[in-house]
Image (tube, rainbow, N blue to C red):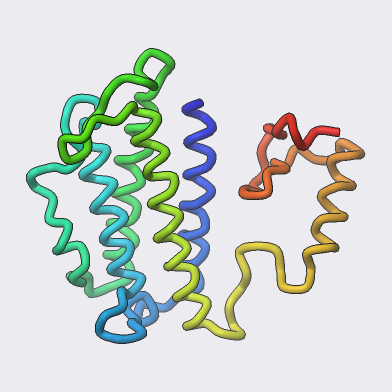
Amino acid sequence: MKDLFVKRFEYYKSLGDKTFGQLTDEQMFWQYNDESNSIAVIVKHIAGNMLSRWTNFLTEDGEKSWRNRDGEFVNTFTTKEQVLDFWEKGWECFFEALEKINDDNLYSTTYIRGEAHPVIDAVLRQLAHYPYHIGQIVYIAKMIKNEDWNTLSIARNRSQEFNTEMKNKFVNNESDANSSPVCFQNSPEVRDEYKQ
């Protein structure tokens, strides 16, 4: 289970990484309007959440007393490098926490703001939360880049071609790529329901 979690989160992190690679320093801080978040601010929130939720997650409440959630929505970064450093710090904390999950503690109780959660539910909460914000990051970047955007998914008007290519690979056992409709990263895992 832990390995599946790690793989899924690595995929979503890669979407963020590939997005940042297309952006300039200035574009990381672009806002549609005063009420909108920049990519830098969204990163600050995601990483801030990770550091709070996953530091000592088996023994401490996930909403740490030192966290300032409201402050996560105020930009304090001045460079893209600072944003990316904080992004990496959050993910490092999170992946280290995932490595501590095993069959013995998967259903043990952890707390977020005093509310009890099985460990698996705490992870699933974030499997919804982090991709939600990463989707925002990708969408903002697509607006900024416009025709210069390099897609991270199946290219527009290429779905049938992609589907045919994937079916041919798996019918002919030509690839170890993951057949999941959510994650197209290379992987030795092919979900049973997609096997022929």
Q: Find residue 61 and report its horizontal and vertical position in percent.
A: 17, 34
Q: Residue at x 33, y 82 (%)?
A: 31
* Depicted 18 relative to depicted 7: above or below: below
- Name the outermost residue toward the left: 65
Horizontal and vertical percent for residue 71? 14, 63
* Image position of 2 with respect to 37: above or below: above
Residue 57 placement (x, y as % from top left): 24, 31
**Residue at (33, 27) in percent of width and height:** 118
The answer to which image quadrant residue 154 occupies is: bottom right
Farthest residue, direction top: 104
Q: Is residue 54 left or right of residue 193?
A: left
Reply above or below: 43 against 183: below
**Number of numbered discs:** 0
Image coords of residue 103 (percent x, y): 43, 16
In the image, 29 versus 115, the foreground residue is 115
**Residue in the picture at 29% in, 46% down:** 50
**Going 56% across and 84% down the picture, which residue do you hit?**
146
In-front residue for pair 81/122 = 122
Q: Quadrant of the C terminus?
A: top right
Seen from the viewer's position, the closer of residues 76 and 132 is 132
Residue at the front extreme of this rendering: 115
Q: Is residue 165 left or right of residue 38?
A: right
